[in-house]
Image (cartoon, rainbow, N blue to C red):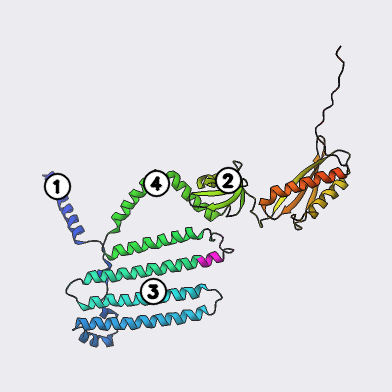
Amino acid sequence: MADSSDHKVLNNVASETATDSATNPPMDISENLPEFADWLPEFILPYWNTISQYPIIGAIVITSIFFLLAFVIRELFVRSIDKIAGRTKTELDDRVLIGLKKPVFNVVFLFGLTLAVRAAALPAGTDFIIKVLLSLIIVTLIRSTFFLSSELLGALARNHHRFSAIEERTMPLLDIIAKLLIMLIGSYSLLLVWGINPVGWLASAGIVGLAVGFAAQDTLANLFAGFFILIDSPYKLGDYVNLDSGERGMITHIGMRSTRMLTRDDVEITVPNSVMGNAKIINESGGPHEKMRLRIAIGVAYGSDVHQVESLLHNIATNHSEICDYPEPRVRMRGFGDSSLDFELLGWIIAPEHKGRISHEINKQVYDLLNQAKIEIPYPKRDLYIKEMPR
């Protein structure tokens, strides 16, 4: 008996749950719209009650009122924002003002049409028309939000010295992320308007996302690494970098999946972003400026006049047209080698790509001038002693 009563209770609960789910469909925004009379002040209600006896006339009155209201709001909006924009030096507010004139008018007018359709009491199709009008309002808001996000990101990119994460090269990524978020919110609102429960769609999307994540782990790793490379900015387009694997070249492309660099042999190397994100990278173009210090090691024989050597090397650097005057070139005596006095010539060059050619030119000048000054450049020597001549 207890078992049968328990089964009856469970059956009753299941039937009540099924009845609730059937009688309580997903929320429909169009069903919660207020009547037009709820928006009116009390002294106008008697006139509206008279007009409302003729639904078509009431709908025409509502449409006319909201058309005028949309026009007035647009003009007031334009004038007030125009006054504020006139006090600023940027062009952002002017472009926003021009871009929002039409959306402001459309949203107010479409909302008035929605109330007019509700007041018209059409014999059929009222709910469908209201949903279409609300969908148009949401689409208008999505488009205007797209416009605002693009303009805001563009303004921040133009002031990249204050916002280092937003630059010309990161603009496409941030723009796509902003538009995806806007589309997600807009799509969710559209589903609510049409009475579609988005929970099932989200659950399905989560399952599909897990499957895609397991199937494309390497691709996702490259995508996330590319995102952080764009935000962290360890290098940028045009920089000369050295990888820990030995490659050296100029960055020509930074994508979401890979980075491409062009070597001095005109060979393009494509490196996955997951590798670049975990590699040790020497950026020769980094720092406060693009200049790079060139180091030329020179050894002279013991017994040479070190002051003469220093003066000679310094003159070579100062007379070279591509060695910067600031910072000033320097000559340093680094130590005493096994068979040489070790000097180093230090000079700044404009860009890293000139390093090989300028080093070549300076090495030739050093060799010629040391020969002219009779200063020996030591090299390994071996003395052979024959203890006894063979018979």
Q: Earlier in the sequence, mark 4 or mark 1?
A: 1
Drawn side of residue 390 relative to residue 293, left or right: right
- What is the quadrant of the N terminus in the image? top left
Question: Can you identify the residue that label 4 sits on?
Answer: 213
Q: Residue at x 28, y 85 (%)?
A: 42
Farthest residue toward the top? 391
Question: Can you identify the residue that label 3 sits on?
Answer: 103
Q: Quadrant of residue 160?
A: bottom right
Residue 334 lies, with reference to residue 151, above or below; the image says above
What range is drawn magenta here?
Answer: 154-164
Q: Earlier in the sequence, mark 2 or mark 4?
A: 4
Question: Can you identify the residue that label 1 sits on?
Answer: 7
* Type of amino acid at the residue the image marks with label 1: His
* Type of amino acid at the residue the image marks with label 4: Gly
Q: Residues within 10 Å of mark 4 (few under 14, many from 20)?
A: some
Kindly report which numbered mark, 4 or 1, lies closer to the viewer in this rendering.
Answer: 4
At numbered mark 3, what does the secondary structure look like: helix, strand or loop? Answer: helix
Farthest residue toward the left? 1
Drawn side of residue 192 relative to residue 167, left or right: left
Q: Earlier in the sequence, mark 4 or mark 3?
A: 3
Q: Can residue 242 be seen in this snapshot?
A: no
Residue 91 lies, with reference to residue 377, above or below; the image says below
Q: Which of 171/118 is in front?
A: 171
Question: What percent of the width, then of the height, locates residue 271?
Answer: 53, 45
Q: Residue at x 28, y 66 (%)?
A: 193
Question: What percent of the width, then of the height, locates residue 366?
Answer: 80, 46
Kindly report which numbered mark, 2 or 1, lies closer to the viewer in this rendering.
Answer: 2
* Type of amino acid at the residue the image marks with label 3: Pro
Q: Quadrant of residue 187?
A: bottom left
Q: Residues within 10 Å of mark 2 (few under 14, many from 20)?
A: few
